[in-house]
Image: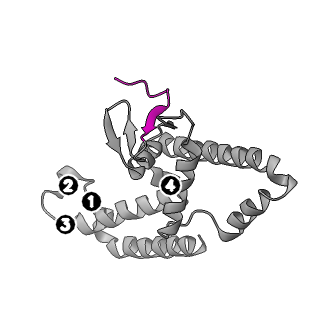
């Protein structure tokens, strides 16, 4: 098994074909993009000269995605990048971009941690508990008279049978409150 903590070495032949040294087969630019999306670092080198071509190919991947309408970089950001090549600001831009993307990665991982800490991500949603209680009351009212339901769910008590219209009114009230809360969100 190949070590995934080392960059995947891809060699470019004189014919401009890209060769994956781990699997001993030719790959396309889209394959390289797939390796990167999967979290793998890549290094692309020219077989003849040994020059590192990684930056060139990464820029080509970005350019192809942008030209296909998969716009990630707004025009003003692209304009600022072009300007940074012609000004003294170019020394600050790489550090700024690296720090920005690092903050983005950290933020994404924190969001994923928070989502996975709940048994049900919907449980964190405001009003979820009230909605769940309303659904339980509704099911109790609707299913209470059906034979066999008492064994798989809460059995209706005599008060619920007698005061079914009160429960329905209560459910309607709770639903109206939930709709108000949801419309505010």
Cα separation between marks 3 and 4:
63 Å
Numbered circles on residues, count: 4
Q: Residue at x 48, y 56 (%)?
A: 129
- Toward which corner of the image does residue 75 lie, by quadrant? bottom right
Q: Residue at x 39, y 46 (%)?
A: 17
* Quarter in which the N terminus is drawn: top left
Q: Is residue 20 above or below residue 124?
A: above
In front: label 2 or label 4: 4
Sequence-first disc among 1 and 4: 4
Looking at the picture, tell me which residue is in the foreground, 8 or 52: 52
Percent of width and height locating residue 27: 35, 44
Sequence-first disc among 2 and 3: 3
Residue 8 located within the stretch drawn in magenta: yes
Looking at the picture, tell me which residue is in the foreground, 13 or 164: 13
Cα separation between marks 2 and 1:
7 Å
In front: label 1 or label 4: 4
Q: Residue at x 48, y 35 (%)?
A: 48
Which residue in the protein does label 4 denote?
61
| Mark 3 residue element | loop
Residue farthest to the right? 88
Q: Say which mark, if any, is on residue 145.
A: 3
Cα separation between marks 2 and 4:
61 Å
Percent of width and height locating residue 43: 51, 36
CB atoms of marks 2 and 3 within 8 Å: no
What secondary structure predominates along the stretch shown in magenta? loop
Which residue in the protein does label 1 denote?
156
Q: Which residues are magenta?
A: 1-13
């Amino acid at each position: 098994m190949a070590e995934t903590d080392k960059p995947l070495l891809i060699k470019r032949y004189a014919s401009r074909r890209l060769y994956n040294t781990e699997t001993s087969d030719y790959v396309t630019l889209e394959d390289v993009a797939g390796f990167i999306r999967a979290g793998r670092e890549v290094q692309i080198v020219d077989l003849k000269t040994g020059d590192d071509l990684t930056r060139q190919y990464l820029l080509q991947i970005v350019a192809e995605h942008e030209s296909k309408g998969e716009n990630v970089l707004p025009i003003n950001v692209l304009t600022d990048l072009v300007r940074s090549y012609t000004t003294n600001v170019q020394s600050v831009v790489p550090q700024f971009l690296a720090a920005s993307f690092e903050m983005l990665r950290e933020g994404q991982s924190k969001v994923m941690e928070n989502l996975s800490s709940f048994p049900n991500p919907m449980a964190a949603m405001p009003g979820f508990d009230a909605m769940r209680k309303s659904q339980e009351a509704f099911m109790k009212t609707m299913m209470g008279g059906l034979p066999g339901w008492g064994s798989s769910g809460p059995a209706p008590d005599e008060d619920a049978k007698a005061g079914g219209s009160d429960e329905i009114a209560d459910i309607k009230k709770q639903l109206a409150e939930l709709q108000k809360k949801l419309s505010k969100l």
